[in-house]
Image (cartoon, coloured by chain):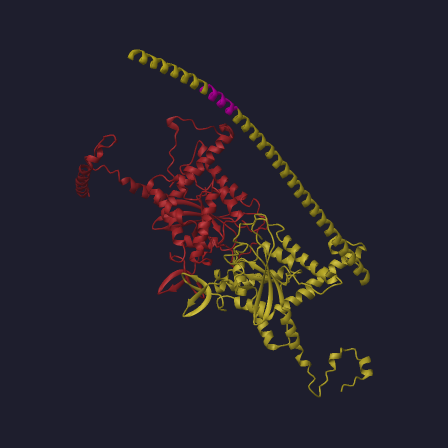
Chain colours: A red, B yellow
Amino acid sequence: MGIEETKKESELEAEVQLELRQSAPSFQTGFIRGTDLFGYVGIEAVLDQMRRKTMKAGFEFNIMVVGQSGLGKSTLVNTLFKSKVSRKSCTPDYEEKISKTVKLHTVSHVIEEKGVKMKLTVIDTPGFGDQINNENCWEPIVKYINEQYEKYLREELNINRKRRIPDSRVHCCIYFLPATGHRLRPIDLEFMKRLGKIVSIVPVIAKADTLTVEERQEFKERIRKDLTSNGIHVYPQREYDEDPEERVLNDRIRESIPFAVVGTDKEHQVNGNKVLGRKTKWGIIEVENVAHCEFANLRDLLIRSHLQDLKDVTHNIHYESYRVRRLNESNMNFSELVLSSWPLKNGTDTCETESQL
Amino acid sequence: TMNIDPRSSRTNNNPVLQQQKNLDGYVGFASLPNQVYRKSVKRGFEFTLMVVGESGLGKSTLINSLFLTDLYSTEYPGPSHRIKKTVQQVEQSKVLIKEGGVQLLLTIVDTPGFGDAVDNSNCWQPIIDHIDSKFEDYLNSESRVNRRQMPDSRIHCCLYFIAPSGHGLKPLDIEFMKRLHEKVNVIPLIAKADTLTPEECQQFKKQIMREIQEHKIKIYEFPETDDEEENRLVKKIKDKLPLAVVGSNTIIEVNGKRVRGRQYPWGVAEVENSDHCDFTILRDMLIRTHMQDLKDVTNNVHYENYRSRKLAAVTYNGVDNNKAKGQLSTKSPLAQMEEERREHVTKMKKMEMEMEQVFEMKVKEKVQKLTSRDCELQRRHEQMKKNLEAQHKELEEKRRVFEDERSNWELQQRLEQQKMEASRTLEKNKKKGKIF
């Protein structure tokens, strides 16, 4: 074992030296000419350690779905995470009548893939926009989001805080737009205006199999125009792009939001393959086919590429602005905020909090 | 010859129709339907259709598809394409369609802004008011003495569009239908039915019908006829209620055939294919078979309800409760005629007076204008004269100065000349002197 390691080390050493020699001229930039590595240190093994720790600890991801009933919210969540995470309200045994106020339902599941565990929480909002008079139907939602921030803030301000503060903050809010083909309705504008400031909104066009491709394009353009003319910023927000690479990537996404999605959990046979789709008399709508609908793009955005980014934006931006607001409100009178006093800033007393993964 | 037995007609309480006698020859009243037909064709038909539903459910597209005209086209965009109205209104568009020599004056009543606001309470009120006002117009024109022209603008049918959520009726749908089912023929439709798979559609329809029965909503019922064939057709329609429709006027080629439909990446949803949607059933029902029945039900049921309620309000109090517009008096026709004539005369007099007033005002204005222009001209004239005089004076001055200069100059010239002559004679004398 030892011999192998040393062999590996010497190989790596050679590699590292080679690299350094090749890049030596470029090292004449403004960096501190520090230690040129003359041996294999092992800094890159940090990635491995992080990965192992993440796998052990698992992720948390909280997603909220908002929209009128009958737009396919639960179906979409089930399709996204390929499991029966939400109960669909159109099944015969769904007894609840439309409630008079918006009541939030939280359902948590732990799903696992290749050893990576994820605690997925779906927050459903039945009753949103269903009444005749929908004034202030967004208030319960705003209250819930702020409550989650408050919970986290309190945990953070404790003297004896936990190692890993349970994160119940809403990382992403998917807002379902009915596929009218015209423009945003007043209720959509009101909701997104108010919530765009406290949570990352991802608008999607629900039941997009109503629209032909041209109608879809026109509808999206009109929505984007409406959003900019009303000053609504949806995820990914332009001002939070960290570097040009990210900007390019996010620009491409911004040009195609809102995604036109179709959700289903039924499988059919198409050309010998089993695909997820909806079967009608004139054809089968394949959910994962990019030519049919943009479900795959949404899934990639939410899960495969921007999941961590969503959590970071929530933690660094939305949560921080909530915190600032809250602390300003109580005028730095911390004894009001927390029963115990604000932890003193002596070096010995800082607690190790792991970065939220 | 028919012998009517007096005894039998006295004791017999059944209607005369019971005594159906066979005829001995051809009388000819079998051509009565033809006569009616010819008269109707000459007169033409009227039909008023109202479409209600949230924006974006395809109402305008469906109307265009039903009547195969571009009632709402790019040159005359329908209410949903114009600037968004959040204040709900009721709009009417009329179109005259001719087919096979038969004229149809079609009026479409649209309700843009219905159910689009955040707070939709009472969004049905403008619609109810509109329907009532049409009934009132008809009632008034019916009660006049001169009834030659009675335009029938009552709403004969109301198509209510339900969003294809797949769940059931929304509270707004239920409220609206509950308030309107006794005023107009309500036909609920599932809009944009190409969103639903056949199973979802079935379930949705069942759910809707269940809720309609639960809330005791009386939608338009197809009448039972004596004909077996027709009854079977009617029953087939009844099983498919509410009808799930898809509208389109774009023509697409499918398997060499040209059909109206919507082109998707996964296939073409054909509008006139009864497997795909119930559009053909709706069209046949609305136009080909039941149009007259809709009008009859409107006339005999809804209008009569309105009329009896309105008149009962009058007679109950003894005092005329209605506003001045719809005054129904129980005077004799002659007196009413007198009153009408008097009204007419007073109206004419008022119009005359108004016209005279307007005329006078206009004359005054014109006179004023002319006088003011006159004054202007005068003023300008005076000014010009003054200018001229001033210029004249200036010129005079200049001439005087010039004359002065000239006389000075002439004087000088003479002096100079004299000097020169004197010097010349002096020189001459000198020369003379020198020579000698």
Residue B310 seen: yes
Q: Is residue A29 magenta?
A: no
Q: Between residue A38 and residue B361, name the one nearer to us.
A: B361
Total number of numbered discs in the rendering: 0
Q: Considering the image in quadrants, where does the N terminus of chain A appear?
A: top left
Q: Position of residue A333 (x, y in %)?
A: 50, 27
**Is B399 in the magenta?**
yes
Left or right placement of residue B422 versus residue B225 in this view: left
Which stretch did the figure color magenta?
B397-409
Q: Quadrant of residue A167?
A: top left
| Above or below, comparing residue A98 to residue A319 in the picture | below
Q: Closer to the camera, B159 or B398? A: B398
Q: Compared to A329, does B179 lie above or below?
A: below
Expressed as whole percent of the image width and height from the top left, the position of residue B310 reads 74, 58
Q: Is residue A85 left or right of residue B183?
A: left
The residue at 71%/65% (across/down) is: B148
Q: Quadrant of residue A233?
A: top left
Measured along the vertical axis of the image, is residue B36 above or below residue A243?
below
Q: Position of residue A346 (x, y in %)?
A: 39, 26
Camera-side residue: B282 or A281?
B282
The C terminus of chain A appears in which quarter of the rendering?
Answer: top left
Q: Position of residue B367 (x, y in %)?
A: 67, 42
Residue B221 visible in the picture: no
- Residue A223 lies left or right of residue B326; in this view the side is left
Query: Main SS of the magenta segment?
Result: helix
Q: Is residue A94 left or right of residue A13?
A: right
